[in-house]
Amino acid sequence: MKEFISILFLFFSCSSSFSQTTIDLKIVPFEITNQNFYINNVIDNRQELHLGVIEDNFNKKVKLSLKHGTAKTIKHFMDAALPKTGESAPITLSVNHLKIEEAQTSIDKRTARVYVECSFYSENGEVLYKVDHYETEVFPVSSLTEIYETHEKRIRAALEYCLWRFIDSQRKNTTPNLLKDRLLNNATSTEEVSVFETYKPLGKWFNMLTFKRVYDKYNEGWNISYTGFSDHEKDLIIPFIIGYSQSRSKSDIVQERGYSSVDSYALGFGFNGFIKITPGFYVDIGLNAPIGLEVLRDLEDKKSTHFLIGLSANQGVKIIPWKAFGIVIGAGIFQRWQNSEIINRNFGFQLELGLNF
């Protein structure tokens, strides 16, 4: 029994070790002329102590953190950039947010991003400057290893950006000889404190396979499609969609036109947009140009084909109740214009059911 417990303990210990990984931030000095201050103290003021949760090459979620801790690592970085001298004023740096993200943001691209928000304080604790920054790079969707290996580069770039913004803010309308006096005397004004937007996370990528049943006055048909999109808080989301549809004209209208049967096969290409109303609920609008083939059989069962092209508009709603994995439900109406041998203008409605993953 003791051996069994020991094996379980070893297993969970190994699992835990794989659930976290550290980033070793390189200390790369960069030149700052006319240095009048140094970073005396770094405070980690974040609510979440890790840097973010990402997926490794085995699709396992891991937590990221800096190898020597956030405050200590950033202090070493700042010491290399701004060595302490007897003529420089002490500044406290508060790290309010530092977050690493990566997500698929298009059908073939993956975005890696570092978000940082910092506050600079004078010796008596008054805020001198606030700044935030997104450091973003886009990679091929398969470049997980390269993305992981370059996270530390984006952290360095984000910290350097914040430092330069603070330096520029203090030098603005201030001569180099007076800069130290301003810092030591805790000079501050509302113009020196930047205003920035609320942090917004990268959108999660959704894949959907859906089946639509299509009804109108003259045809009955179906459509199967793949949809991929990055869910975000913007007003309009542009998804990637490719679909295949098939329909058959109803017998009464077909016979009136002198045929026994008419079948249509088409691929859909065009523009679609999702307007996010609430999480999981979207308005779906689109304009597409279906291209395909119309297969006709006359009353003597003679077969002929006709190249089919048209224009289709659709309006509807799409519901994704469970975002991680689950069902997709949709309904809508459409209007269609095409060079059919049977009906050139048409409208109808469609019901949709599918899976998201």
Image: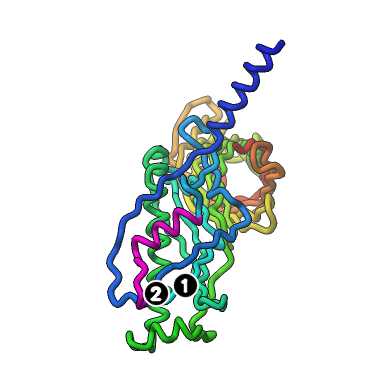
Residue shown at the point (44%, 50%) measured from the top left: 112
Q: Give the percent coordinates (x, y) of residue 103.
A: 50, 46
Residue 81 shown in magenta: yes
- From where the camera sits, is residue 92 visible? yes
Q: Which residue is mark 2?
A: 37
User: Magenta residues?
Assistant: 71-87
Mark 2 is on which residue type? Phe
Task: Assess whether mark 2 and mark 1 are in contact (beta carbons under 8 angstroms).
Answer: yes
Q: Nearer the viewer, residue 220 or 52?
A: 52
Badge 2 marks a residue whose secondary structure is: strand
Q: Which residue is mark 1?
A: 91
Residue shown at the point (64%, 22%) measured from the top left: 9
Mark 2: give few (<14), some (14-19) or many (20+) Cα within 10 Å: many
Q: Is residue 239 above or below residue 128?
A: above
Q: Is residue 222 above or below residue 120?
A: above
Residue shown at the point (58%, 31%) measured from the top left: 16
Q: Give the percent coordinates (x, y) of residue 183.
A: 45, 81
Q: Give the percent coordinates (x, y) of residue 205.
A: 54, 45
User: What is the distance, in whole Å, between disc 1 and disc 2 at their CAs?
Assistant: 7 Å
Question: Which image quarter holds the N terminus?
Answer: top right
Q: Nearer the viewer, residue 137 or 284?
A: 137
In primary-sequence order, the first of circles 1 and 2 is 2
Q: Nearer the viewer, residue 85 or 229?
A: 85
